[in-house]
Amino acid sequence: VRDLVVENADYIVDSLCRQLRHLDLNPQVPNVIAAVLSYIGMAHDILPLLDEP
């Protein structure tokens, strides 16, 4: 799972950012992000990608 997330981080982050813009429609997104990052231990690598320009 870790390798899949790392190799596809750009696609995952793009999708998450779109969903985070509409938390009223996707209230579970922050919990999913936290669970996945906790499971794979990659929060320090993935979270900076969520910082949009």
Image (cartoon, helix red, strand yellow):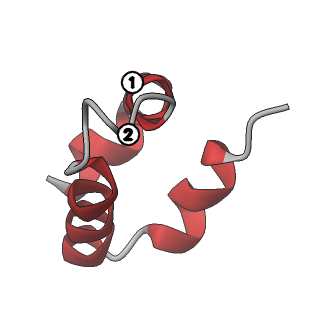
Q: Secondary structure at mark 1?
A: helix
- Residue at 52%, 55% in the rendered image: 46
- Residue at 47%, 70% in the rendered image: 43
Q: Secondary structure at mark 2?
A: loop
Tell me the kind of residue under disc 2.
Leu
Side of 46 where 8 appears, left or right: left
Evaluate if marks 2 and 1 touch, with contact meaning CB atoms under 8 Å apart.
no
User: Which residue lies most toward the left here?
Assistant: 1
Percent across and percent down for residue 3 are 26, 49
Of mark 2 and mark 1, the one earlier in the sequence is: 1
Rendered view: 39 above or below 2: below
Side of 21 where 28 appears, left or right: left
Side of 12 where 26 appears, left or right: left
Tell me the kind of residue under disc 1.
Ser
Rendered view: 10 above or below 42: above
* Residue named by callout 2: 23
Rendered view: 22 above or below 50: above
What is the distance, in whole Å, between disc 2 and disc 1 at their CAs? 13 Å
Which quarter of the rendering shows the C terminus?
A: top right
- Residue at 34%, 77% in the rendered image: 41
- Residue at 46%, 23% in the rendered image: 18
